[in-house]
Image (cartoon, rainbow, N blue to C red):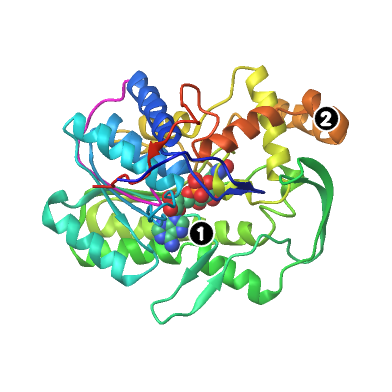
Amino acid sequence: MSEQVVKPRIRGFISLTAHPDGCAANVREQVAAIDAAGLTASGGTALVLGSSTGYGLASVLVAAFGLRAKTLGVCFERPPEDDKPASAGWYNLAEARRLASERGLTFETVNGDAFSSEVKEGVIARLRAGLGPADLVVYSIAAPRRRGDDGTIWNSVLKPIGRPYTGLGFDLRNERVVDSNIEPASPEEIATTVKVMGGEDWTAWVEALHAAGLLAPGCRTVAYSYIGPEFTAAIYRRGTIGRAKEHLETTAHQLDRRLQEAVGGHAWVSINTGVVTQASAAIPAVPLYMSILFKVLKERGLYETAVDQIVRLVRDHVGPGVEPRLDPERRIRLDDREMRPEIQQAITELWLRARNENLAETTDYAGYKRDFERLFGFGVDGVDYDAPTEIDRSLG
Ligand code: NAD
């Protein structure tokens, strides 16, 4: 037992602390949205890699509470230690596990480095021990680095390719629109970003599961990607991360063929819309773009959360008994609202006008900031931030 008052310690695009009750309230809100969506319970087993925050959390919650699948999630979170609170993802999954057991659902988590053989073997052992072969495998890892089994470290960088990026950026620390200038990546940096965020590890997971006989007949696997607008393309889609995403998308084609032969299954990439997460907050220019995107979508009643997106993904594309609608590159497009020409046109007009003096008028930065603080369990209605709370919570 260790009770304490937890205060935010936000530094730019991360918070050094997370509030257990705020994170728990966020998860309850997401589960309530899933309940309201009324998905058909199909059961089965879902493995979600990167299950503790953002799109992976939404995926494991939709699988558990929507499909009523047995779930096994993998994440890389900091547990509570003495008087130090755990990271947000830890508290998210502690609450999800508590809610799942109230409802008699199987909700398990492995906390460790998904890139390692050790964690892959641990997951295989858990599936063998009773969770069963996977009907759905979601790959939602967003990592700044990857460690090989032999100790080699590859870092992922967010840089343009070929020439410098010059354009607007947003300094989250000082909350100011800034001119951003980022030098292009070296060939080595491009290769290491692909190594971390491309499809190699997704393939390794699918192969390990197949070798262990743990891909259920008709198993479906999906990994997440992003495209975004033309004016962030130099830093995102045509930059190092975009190169990694192209690799991920090519991997989907190869895995699809492998899965069809092996178990009559499928592999797809889903292009999701922009939402505030720890990973997306770290991308230059993206916080400003998203602040404008949210304003434009909210004004038109088109705004969606990560859970809204994953409910749509499961209901319309990858859930049992449905076939996905794919674009010409075989990708599922959940970014259809974001990419509508009239939405992008409205965003471009605001982007050209956005300055520090008119942020409240040209952007929904207030909404962005609220979402950002909520990632760490702060700014959540109904939570008493002056009261001591138990920081030692268990993932089960
Ligand atoms: P996130 O930072 O919220 O989540 C990352 C997850 O990966 C966490 O669960 C974390 O614990 C886990 N993780 C990181 N390193 C790990 C490791 N070594 N081993 C095990 N787990 C590890 O990120 P997110 O924004 O939800 O991104 C998930 C995926 O969705 C990414 O592929 C991202 O490109 C994609 N995506 C995100 C957005 C967006 O706007 N956020 C939009 C479209 C697609």
Q: Is residue 337 visible?
A: yes
Mark 1 Cβ and ligand 1 under 8 Å apart? yes
Specify the quadrant of the image occupied by residue 182.
bottom right
Is residue 375 shown left or right of residue 51?
Answer: right
Q: Residue at x 69, y 44 (%)?
A: 286
Kindly report the distance in space between the C-alpha atoms of the residues bearing marks 1 and 2: 33 Å
- Three-letter code, disc 2: Glu
* Residue 66 higher or lower than 158, as above or below: above
Q: Choose the circle earlier in sequence order: 1 or 2.
A: 1
Residue farthest to the left, as pictured: 130
Judged by depth in the image, the label closer to the viewer, 1 or 2, is: 1
In which quarter of the view is residue 255 placed?
bottom left
Element marked by disc 1? loop
Camera-nearest residue between 339 and 294? 294
Which residue does the numbered mark 1 point to in the structure image? 143
Q: Which mark is residue 349?
A: 2
The residue sitting at 83% across, 46% down in the picture is 178
- Residue 304 vs 210, above or below: the answer is above
| Label 2: element kind | helix
Magenta stretch, overall SS: loop
Q: Are marks 1 and 2 in contact (CB under 8 Å)?
A: no
Is 180 located above or below residue 163 in the figure?
above
Taking the magenta stretch, the answer to whether it contains residue 16 is no
In magenta, the rendered stretch is 38-52
Is 43 on the left-hand or right-hand side of 77? left
Q: Is residue 133 above or below residue 308?
A: below
Q: Is mark 2 within 8 Å of ligand 1?
A: no
